[in-house]
Amino acid sequence: MSNGLSAQDGLKDASVYKVGDRKEFWTWNLTVMPPEDVKLQATCRGVGENVYVFVSDDVWDVNVFKQDIEKIITAFDHSTPETSIDKDKGIYEILTETFGRPPDVDNDHRIYFLISQLGGFHSHHFDGYFRFLDELEGKHSNHTEMLYLDCDDPSDDYYLGIIAHEFQHLIHWQYDRNEEGWISESLSEVAMILCGYYTDKKHVIRYLNNTDRPLVSKGHHNVSYGACLLWGTYIYENLGIKFLGNLVREKENGIKGFQNTLKSMNIEDDFSTVFGDWLVANYLCSNPVNDEKFKYKSILLPITPTIKHFFSLPVYETGKVNGYAVDYLKFSIERVKNKKLRITFKSDCPDDFLIKIIRIYNDDLSNPRVEDVILNEPIATFDVSDVGVDCREIVLVVSVLKTTKEPIPYSFSVSLITCAGTVLNQ
């Protein structure tokens, strides 16, 4: 095998460009919004089995070097890190096998990478993007399959992860052009995980530090990439890798498309069930939990989610939570016998709430007990029995199963009372 820079060795078919060829591309000036269409001169610096790598002339041998091109082609065509689902396959093969084939408007199966100085707008720096404009006929279209990548250390694992992320968006365009942003980004984030690039930990940390950020959102500007990474990884691990490809090919969008995919694969769970289990998993997975649906196998969470922790009872509090976000309310119970926890929950829209109780046992952290609470009335009271000895931690998981413009308010009271045999009301 050569270093990947030759247009002759080991390629599936003849390439249109060879190393040293120059080409002018349309791109975006991202220092203004909306972006301006501008032309950029670049030179082909590498040709792989599935990729042309063009580099803007002003950053060659300044930000981007020959060894960067070799690493990029190797990762895309041949091998990925040990943590990928198959280290002997490149990004291209892993993701086309998972999600499907990319479009091919120019009758050349190779994907163009254009590496340049993407810059930023205000405090936001751009790492890479896919422009669907290039799939269409138009004045500013390159009319080819193309990813735009920043020149800042472009062969670093972080930027190889960006390639996986944006390549999923390109593939997704082939099958479903109107998918909701949170689904599309969840699939692009898990594409990075499948290829062995768990490089978006900063987004996961940001989400876990504030879990009152919705997973399900309207538009791209409200997407939480940390929530999407965890969601994408969770559905891959619990619903299977085939689910990901089927979800891409499902024409309906958002939750409806997710439900259709579950149904088409004869999976009995619905979206709200999977979503609720995911919320529990995000809380519990820092412990060695036995139940497979409450832990991650592909990743480790860098921190535990932020909680509201109450160390003494009784408690009388108010809260508010956004739709498809979550509050974790933790109650530590003193060592007492013959007591139960009485919880009263108040809201104006009880039918919209998703409530789960997690019972954590001091001497067996690996087997927490998780129970659903159904709210039928604006004021609901439920009891958790046998607390205070073996079970001294109760976590209330509070979410809302609808999109909201503003957080939904609620209030709750929690107290210890003498146990008289009452069990959790459902």
Image (tube, grey):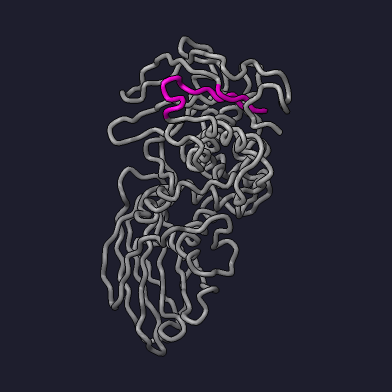
In the image, residue 14 lies at what x, y percent?
71, 18
In the image, residue 298 lies at what x, y percent?
57, 55
Q: Is residue 212 left or right of residue 260?
A: left
Residue 249 visible from this viewpoint = no
Q: In this view, does 334 lie to the left or right of 302?
A: left
Q: Which is more toward the observer, 282 or 91? A: 91
Q: In this view, does 280 lie to the left or right of 266?
A: left
Q: Which is more toward the observer, 233 or 262? A: 233
Question: What residue is drawn where x is 39% and y is 49%?
Answer: 323
Question: What residue is drawn where x is 38% and y is 78%?
Answer: 341
- Residue 51 counted in the magenta span: yes
What span is in magenta? 45-62
Question: What residue is drawn where x is 59% and y is 67%?
Answer: 291
Q: Which is more toward the observer, 406 or 124? A: 124
Residue 86 visible from this viewpoint = yes
Q: Is residue 180 above or below residue 146?
A: below
